[in-house]
Image (cartoon, rainbow, N blue to C red):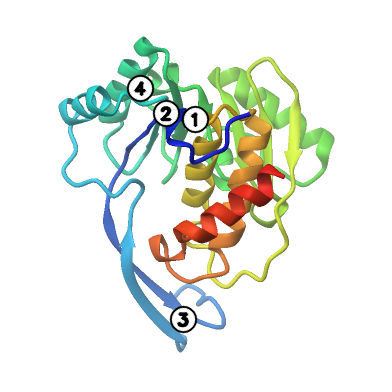
Amino acid sequence: MAEPGDTTAGGILVVGSTMMDLIAYADVLPEAGQTVFGSDFRMGFGGKGANLDLTAELALEALDAVDPVIVIAQFETPQSVSAAAFAGARARGVTTVLNPAPATDPDPALLAATDWLVPNEHEFVLLGGDPLTGEEAADDGAIHRLADRLGVGLVVTLGERGAVVLERGGYIVRVPAPRVRAIDTTGAGDAFVGAFAVGLASGWTSTDAARLGCAFAADSVTRTGTQSSFAAAEDARTILREVRS
């Protein structure tokens, strides 16, 4: 099994957006119409991919330039752009990973070229899945039904409860999350998807790739911000070694 992060494993192309995140912190969340005191405010780089103006032509040019083994897309950029990139990837036999955030109705052409769909439990429901209650038998049925209807491999992220993995035609595997003291969950989903893709690109099984995703997501929630919360290079190497062992 190759070690994630090994550059010989192949590149990862992210078809995504960039933006400035404005994050306010408060001891309690305000209700509708309520004003509360905040305890902190942060501004920093965010977005799923950190790209500037993005078109289908640019995505296809990047596909040629990077020659990736994994292509990731999401819903912050036009779905037509992601669909074009995924179609090009599928023609090359490249694995595609779709993070359906922010949740909206998916383009059938995009879904048709998606290998792995990675929603959180709220996005899972907005995509047409039944609410996940924590009761395993009922949740297993809901996950199987959505995966079969959409025709994709499915990884549902569940926050502190880890993730659920279902390969096409396979069986459900539950991956626990490391126990940490969370101070800011912003960007945890992106950390998971990125690490999951690294695992796949390095030849890991989907379950081991999800375990890697959970480890990086758990690490990210111990720091504030989005991109600023992601593990630095040396910390990332430590996490990789720990998960691999």
Q: Secondary structure at mark 1?
A: helix
| Residue 192 position (above or below residue 188) | above
| Residue 12 position (above or below residue 227) | above
Q: Which mark is residue 10?
A: 2
Question: Circle 3 is placed at which residue position?
Answer: 34
Q: Secondary structure at mark 2?
A: loop
Left or right? Give the position of 6 relative to 211: left
Q: CA distance from mark 1 to mark 2?
A: 6 Å
* CA neighbours of label 1 inside 10 A, class few (<14), some (14 to 19), many (20+): many
* CA neighbours of label 3 inside 10 A, class few (<14), some (14 to 19), many (20+): few
| For discs 2 and 3, the disc positioned in front in the rendered view | 2
Labelled pair 1, 2 in contact (Cβ < 8 Å): yes
Quadrant of image for the C terminus: top right
Question: Circle 1 is placed at which residue position?
Answer: 201
Image spot of residue 74 (x, y percent): 38, 38
Image spot of residue 164 (x, y percent): 69, 38
